Amino acid sequence: MFGYGRNHFTWNGTLRELEGSYTAFCTERSGPSMTTAPPSSSSGLEVLLSALQNAGDVESTLNILSVLDELLSAGTDRRIHYMIRKGGSEALLTALVNTGRSFSPNYTVLLPLLHLLAKVGHRDRRIGVKAEDAGAVRLTLNLLKHNVTHARRAAACLWVIQVFCSSVSTANLIGESHGLDVIYHLIPQYTTTHLHTVKAAVNAFAALLCTKANVCSAVSKGYISGLLRLYEDWHSKDTQHVAVAVRHALLRCLHKITDSAAGRQALLSQGGIKLLYQTTQMCLLSKSLESLVEPSVQLMRKCLPKTPLPLTSDQSAYTFPLPGGPRAVPDMDVAPDDSSEESDDEEAEDNQEEGSRDYDDDLEIDLTKLRLRPDPDRPKELLPQYSRLCPELSHNFEELDLSSEPEDSSTASSSSSDEESVPLNSFSSRRRCSDSSPSSSGKHSAAQLEPRDFHSHSSIFSSSPSFRNMVREAREDPPPVQRGDEEDDDEEGEEESHHSAMIDRLLERHGACIPHHEPKLYRSAATKTKSIPGFSILAFPDFWGHLPPPGHEPMAPRKPNIQRQKVFEDVQRFLNSDDIVNHVVFDLEDDSLQRPSDSLRFFSKFECGNLRKAIQVRRYEYDLILNADANCSQHNQWFYFEVSNMVADIPYRFNVINCEKSNSQFNYGMQPVLYSVREALEGRPQWVRTGTEVCYFRNHFCPVQGRRRTAFYTLTFTITFKHNEDVCYLAYHYPYPYSALKAHLTVLQKSVDPAKLFFQQQILCGTLAGNSCPVVTITACPASRAWKDMHQLRNRPCIVLTGRVHPGESNASWVMKGTLEFLCSSDPVAQSLREAFVFKIIPMLNPDGVINGTNRCDLNGEDLNRQWCKPDPILSPTIYHTKGFLYYLNSTGRTPRVFCDYHGHSRKKNVFLYGCSVKETLWQSGSTVDTVGLKEDPGYRTIPKTLDRIAPAFSFNSCNYLVEKSRSATARVVVWREIGVLRSYTMESTYNGCDQGIYKGLQIGTRELQEMGVKFCQSLLSVTKDMKTLYSKRLISHIDLDHSILDHKSHNCFEDDEPPCVEEIEYSTDCPALKGTDLDSDVNSNMANADEEEEGDKGHRGEKHRVGSTGQSQQSSLKSHLFPHQIRQTSIEALNEKRQTCNAVSLTNGQIFS
Ligand SMILES: [Zn+2]
């Protein structure tokens, strides 16, 4: 058509070179009018642009436009951006104003000009402002008004108006000038003619709706109803799907308009949801309509009316009277401070909107704060009290003299618990005396905190009558005489008296041999555990124990479009509310609830349990609401509850509807865990990853009292139970209650040889609720009581390990369990470690939170890992005393060699460490502080490097060593800065699994978590002073600890851990933005056959054009077809001439504007 193959045309040379020949070319053709060229230092492009603004006649202008079009269409966007920098937009706008102002504008020039302006303007963010300055905005709107019956001209004006709207003020200006109404009335009912113009009008209308003022105006004029009816009309009549682009553009308008509350309200009241739902169901039937489904789904999600959670209050069902008044802690809910949104992991504020945060801003760059140790938070005189926590120093090891009889019971002194002899801290002692006033509210209060009488453990199972049947079967007893449920209940007391014995028989017959677990010890520990509601029931899995399942558990594949499907089901609830059961079947605050006999039964009043309410919504579907953290109204994420009365082989859908995190590993292959009592009794006591159709997305629920800024998310999963009438437990992650820790420590204590291993459990302090916070000392007994051996013991460096400050992070406890068991084992590495170090371990910094099923906080509603700077001795006793103990160690010259706080991370895979480094923080922040003179011991990298080699779940690349301001009050940063521990870490373990190493693609289980605890210990060998000795001694065969330094590169793990989810977790606020290429192809294809159609606007369009209008235009090139044939030929010749003069040099397109 143009005498050259588009693909073969390459411009060889630069525009600068073009200058001479082009000026000559213009002079030759147009005479002296083109000679007002700028100074010769300007580039060829500037010459062209200057000429464009000064061109007097049509032919010259067309020539220049044609050359520009050629140049811009041959290359990439880079050329257009170059042109914009050189004043291209202004030049085009000036030319537009000059041409368009005349009484009868010349459309031969105006059309190509508008088209070029649309293409360039679409890539110029300031085009709106420039257009206002040039006076082009109203002019273009006037041109549109004069050409409403002239489709091609109208389309050109509409594209330009659309790009002008990238500026809010310009969009408002157009709105004020009645542009909204003019354009709205250009959108016709379904038609097959002038689809380009129709689409341009709808897109321009959508662009105008980027401002509040225009949206208000559109809503008040009732345009939403109009848009819905238009959408319906196009949907129903466009049976051949030739106008998908127009339909998509209409959805864009609806999206924009519903960014306002009034818009959403209008869409709802006009039946928009129903219309969208129905049309979408039709769209699902045809692949060519796929592009309409997602915008419709997002629109429905956005517009579903906000529904308060069906609760009486957002406040937790558990309240705890704090010392010092009815409410010593500010109500977090009313604080408008959005930084109170906490995140899952260690510490941090990960919960903000993607992209809205600037991590580097959070880095501490104040060298004083990074390097200088602040004054201690308490007087020195308070430190000696902690000497009691170093019992290994005062112990006389008398039993070593009796070493011929290591089993002698007298040795118990070295391994006994001094729990009873050490007083709890003063506050809890006082509390215990005074907590007798019952709470006036109907909620559970601390009044019941006295230890419950657990002796009749029949009640362990009393939650489920079905369990009793199961137990009878297991006992192989004859079934009881047929009787009703009520009678059954009456008999309960009687039955209970036999229960202990029965449980014992059951354990005998069916109990699995679970290492380091003794059900009776667990039961006895649980009787001493104090909870707010006064738990008297044990969860079966915690009592019975569990083993890891035999095989690996791969991450669950995500079903395509699963979220969409779930959203449809949720929308149906709104549309067909009559089909919804809506029956509350469990309420933590109402025991007397009547429930249908065929519904599932739920229960959560046991340690770590936190289901607050269960509502049956459909026959096999339940909404679940989690209890907020005690004394608080938020932090829902962790869950643990019992479910029973199920029918086998039926898929039940569960929706946890008040999750708070903005994303979850549930979208990336993670499944909840399930424990079946029947399976346990059949010899498979296992928590297994289970659930299909798992996904996590933002829903339409809101808090009861409308706390601002709170969005809720639904975790939905489907479970098909294996057995009828089973009793099952479902949890976010493998539970690890406080009583389990107590029992475990007792088991460990019994397991060690006191002649070799010094193991002492003590109480760090009492908690708010009067539980004790254990601290464990583990080290090797000295070889003898000789001075030399005792001296070596007294000079062993300390390692301090803490964990579970965040109750929802039960994975941290499993890692800790692995650590404790390893350190007490006879493994030679463990033996070496005990000889090298004294381990001080506080396995659970937040017992009260763990017991009461909170996710994040302690009973005072605060995140304990934000209290380290100045912990309150009354409100945060465990942190206060841990820090005090660390101060004490520091003051006696025993600053820990390593400190590590164990956590769980819900948004990342693998296990990794956070540490602290001044240099890395300064580098990362781009600080100008000169780090050359800064001395820093690189030893903080030794442990992560070692772990990277020996721990399969560990990922060195996820570690970082940055000190953030937002984490300045966390254990890691405070212990590093204030206690001076170089190797101060947070260890983060995934809830999901690994994406590297031998566990790649697998979900993590308790086995792997415990293994991580072992590996962490092993890595400590790398920081022993006497590595060489140990190494040669006996370790070489045990762990692969070679000292070749692998050159790992630190890596900023702030980057998002996962690729974007395939489906939007949040509501998207917009349809996908229109791309520049879309607009280009619209502009270009509108001009296809321009020559033939010049006067044919009112005529019919051929089939060829209709193909273009579906948005599947064949015109992929940027090149317009808007210039008269002659002009195009001439400019091509000019360019070709130039090409021949330098055809020896082949330059790429990108270099053309050098
Ligand atoms: Zn944490």
Image (tube, grey):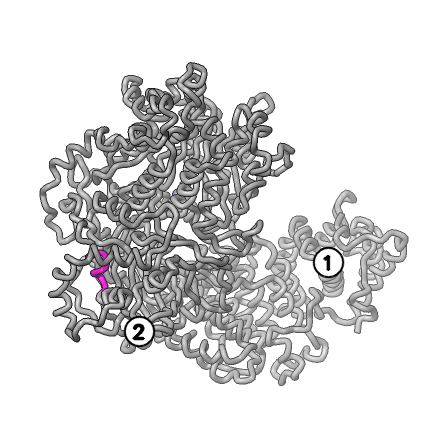
Q: What x and y, as percent, mark residue 233?
A: 46, 81
Residue 7 shown left or right of residue 779 in the figure: right
Residue 158 shown left or right of residue 842 in the figure: right
- Residue 338 part of the magenta-drawn span: no
Mark 2 or mark 1, earlier in chain:
1
Crowding at dot 2, Cα within 10 Å, few <14 / some 14-19 / many 20+, comes out as some
**What secondary structure is found at the residue carrying circle 2?**
strand
Q: Quadrant of residue 153?
A: bottom right
Which residues lie in the magenta part? Answer: 458-464
Kindly identify the residue that appears in the image at 63 percent across and 61 percent down: 117
Crowding at dot 1, Cα within 10 Å, few <14 / some 14-19 / many 20+, comes out as many
Q: Amino acid at mark 2?
A: Arg
Query: Mark 2 — residue?
Result: 618
Query: Mark 1 — residue?
Result: 75
Q: Nearer the viewer, mark 2 or mark 1?
A: 2
Q: What x and y, as percent, mark residue 698?
A: 39, 60
Residue 218 shown left or right of residue 326 in the figure: right
Q: Are marks 2 and 1 in contact (CB under 8 Å)?
A: no
Q: Quadrant of residue 1080?
A: bottom right
- Asked whether 191 or 271 is in front, the reply is 271
Kindly identify the residue that appears in the image at 46 percent across and 68 percent down: 562
**What secondary structure is found at the residue carrying circle 1?**
loop
Q: What x and y, as percent, mark residue 1026?
A: 55, 24
Q: What x and y, as percent, mark residue 1120?
A: 70, 67
